[in-house]
Amino acid sequence: MNQQDFEQRNTPVWTRLDEMIQAIGKRHGKDQRDAKQVEFPHLYRQVCHHLAIARERQYTTHLIDRLNQLMLRSHQYLYSARAGNFSRVMQFIGGGFPALIRREQRLFWLAMALFVLPALIMGLSVYFWPEMIYTLMDSSQVSQFDQMYSPSSPYIGRERGSDDDVLMFGFYIYNNIGIGFRTFAGGMLYGLGSIFFLFFNGLHIGAVAGYLTQRGYIDTFWPFVIGHGAFELTAIVFAGMAGLKLGFSMLAPGRKTRLTALIDAARVSIRIVYGVIGMLVIAAFLEAFWSSIKSFSPEIKYIVGAVLWSMVLLYFIFAGRRHAD
Amino acid sequence: MQIDKVTVAIRPRDSWEAVDLGLRMNQHWWKAIYAPWLIVTLAISAALFYLCWEMQMLWLYVLLFWWFKPLYSRIPLYVLSRTVFGQQLRTLDSLRAVPSLFMAAPLWRLLFMRLSFIRSFDMPVVLLEGLKGKERRERMQVLHRNSASTAAWLTVSFFLFQLLVYFTFLLLIVMFIPQDVDVKQSQILFPFTADVPLLWRISGILAFTLSIVLLEPYYIAAGFALYLNRRTLLEGWDIEIAFHRMIDRLRHSGSIISSLLLPLCMTITIGLAGMTASPAHASQAAPTATEAKQTIKTILQSAEFNAKEKREYYRQKNPRKNDKTNDSDFLRWFAGVGQYLAVVFKAILIILVIMLLVWLGINHARWSGWLRGMRPAPKLAAPTKLFGLDIRPESLPTDIAAQALKLWQAGNARQALSLLYRGALSRLAAHEHITLKESYTEGDCLRVVTRVVSQDTRQYFTRLTTAWQHIAYAKRTPEFADGEALCRQFAAHFEVAT
Amino acid sequence: MLDTYREIETPEGVELQLRPAGPIVRAMAWLVDVLLRFAIYMVAGIALQIFGRFGMGMLLIIVFLLEWFYPVLFEIYWRGETPGKRWLGLRVLNDNGTPVSWGPSLIRNLLRAVDFLPLFNGFGLVTILFNPDFKRLGDLAAGTVVVYKDKETHTALVPETDAHTPPIALRLEEQRAVINFAERSQRLTEVRAAELADIVAPVTGSQGFAGIKRLYEMANWFLGKR
């Protein structure tokens, strides 16, 4: 077949594909379903085939360039990112996430230890030797905590306005999820950044808890933190765990190259981070709108807190046991 | 310069791509460039430092080392201009050339050059083309026409990069200094004045020197590449190279009479022989152990890592903000609206959460599987055709592997691989409970399949898919032995007892 | 041959060319995005301030979303471009040349936190300078690469002449060289154009200006004129 016949016979295919690309391009991201229809990949494969033929038979540059261009453009559309698939999200929540955490158990326990041990040690030290807290904070910070949780504080016992709640919700989103992300990203420094964040946050939380308990602000502090802590503390540990995974992949890449090991680890880590985001949003919601309610007695807060904690525990221990992944 | 021997890909590029090529050149030939460069600059730096130390004017070091940059940056330019055209330089050769390089243009030009915004672009013209006076001016005018603005932006960018790398290094070095050194905030980043503790001043000078030593060759290489690109455009270098190659090929294939060509081709054959790609030794692994250790230490103390206790924000900022907004009735009215909106927002949020919970409750069947494990996804009707291939079990022979092997050995490579691939998909769809959609590409199938099957099968299926794609879309037939292996191993992976 | 280009092969067995973009253009794109975000914060800040604490809360959420997810969402929904990248003609691709997907985009943009250290992308810059594909740490981990966008093809503008069959079958890259010559010869000096044409005199069978004309004719033929 000479070039002219070849062009004549196949031009309908090329123009059809071209039209489809233009149609998809106009809708720009909103609706790319066309690219996923059967026709599109089919046409695309035909064009690839034509291009190979044209190259092999040394047809003119003009034709080859045209086909090459067409191939490249459709390649971009065919492989463009799929919109989040709802059932996959549900699958992840319904079992994929806890299964993932369980699969990476060893990292979890490591991250947990890096967080909880400093918290415990610091908490007990401050409880027995309150002046220890000044190794971490200066006096103005300490007195702020004093004011915040002192039963005589004007903020305690007074119901917060909705605008305060929204402000704090925004702040928790901005600050806590940011910390979660940095804890993860720090893993890129051979894990040291994540270790630091876990350790430092552990120390800090331990110190505050120990100090306020020692001061006797038990009924103002613990009921406040118990509820959202179930999600927030676990999420921080998970974020650290995701970061550690990055770090380990670079330290001990095994039989892969360091770079492939890193890329593979990042693929897994980022799924943990998806979960972390979700948990921290829940935590921010609870902290702003539930933990801040003053009109419930501490007992109710404790009960709800216990329920939340056991939900989280049960979820991560049992959910998705038979999950395929 | 012999264009035939050029070792970089010559083609007309956009200005910024040309700059990128320059950076790439500096990465690629870093040994040849940095060895003589380090020796000379560090020697000069040491001498200057001693001088300024004796004179008790350390700040002068910063000025002088910066001012004379154009002088020593002739070294990387010299190395590049040789290496790009295929000449292998040893460090010693480069060092021998240094005295003549330093003498090449009168020193007073430095003053002029120093203030030029397109220094790295003009340097090749001045130093390599050897033109003088009016001729050079005219030449420069021609060269500047398209590239001067990029060259100027290049200089600005590298000035900023320099600053940034300097700060980075400074912060890394400062890590190792005892923290109780008394430095004013304003002096932290530029500790060169006499009232700063000596240790800090020296750290500053070290960081400053290192940043110049690291970045200057990049800058010079980028300017040089820009210059090469401009000449490529003006003189059609890429065309020349392609034409030479064309003639060379035709001569070898005997399509044209060789006697006509001999004078033209003598140089090129050598040039082509020297053009084999050299191993890329650039720095995947460069930011490793020692460097990272240093960086980590800095970071751990930088502001970035000092996570703040979240509750203090609430107390400090808002009362003040609030007071301000209460200034006028108008603003107070808005603040009132804000409170109203907050209630609405909060309510909406809470309602959404409740709706979500209710929804989850109603649809508990969809997720409650988690306590017992996931239910298998509802099975879709398996497609009968994928990318034009019929994968219905009844369309396939019973012994796929044997049939494929027969085809393969008979030379029907495409049919054999097609049969294997169809067979594999068909078996997978039937037995492994994989949902294949009609719209899937081979890539999609591969992704779905690898999630389910065992490690071995996954590897096999990947190989099979690649082989199939090559033959189907690129008309490339795999090695005979590979194809045979694919046929023989098929049974082990897919002939599961049914 | 040293080049910034990188050839990769698609699953369909066709070659794809990536042109990784260097630090300067990327810094500019980043700066544009930063300024844009900053402008949004300013406007949102002023507008929301009057709503008091509710406004502040909203502002914080906006800042959070923009700081972390602005690049991600743009990269997904604009096929690898953010406004800054679009301005500079860049886009993000996966290493295999496909448009960047959710996971990698999120990875590279969260790890920006590390690239940003110790201040203003210091680590990122140093990594880019050392990496042959100009990748920062985030790109390394995500397996992504920032490339120059492909331009729309233009039809080659060669001088209109009659088309002539070349006397010898030429390969693709040789055909390209002839077309290139025809396109660009007017911007070369006449002497230089003749010099180049003389190199292939054995193919065209003529010297000097006659040679140039023969090359034009061949170029026209390659471009499909009959």
Image: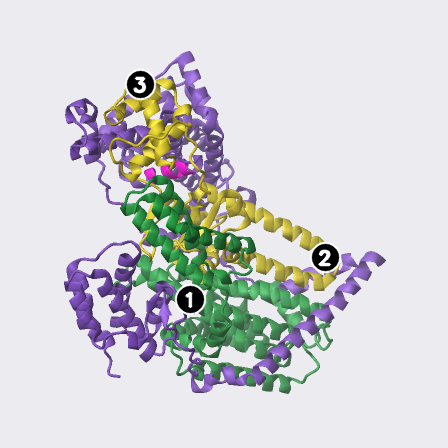
The chain holding disc 1 is B
Residue at image mark 2: C49
Q: Position of residue B54 (x, y in %)?
A: 40, 29
Q: Nearer the viewer, residue B2 or B28?
A: B2
The chain holding disc 3 is C
Q: Amino acid at mark 3?
A: Gly
Residue C208 is labelled as: 3
Q: Dot 2 surroundings within 10 Å: few (below 14), some, or many (20 or more)?
A: many
Up/down of A52 relative to B427, above or below: above
> Is label 1 in a helix, a strand or a loop?
loop
Q: Position of residue A311 (x, y in %)?
A: 52, 83
Q: Earlier in the sequence, mark 3 or mark 2?
A: 2
Q: Is residue B56 magenta?
A: no
Up/down of A92 relative to B36, above or below: below
- The purple chain is B
The mark closer to the camera, 3 or 2, is 3
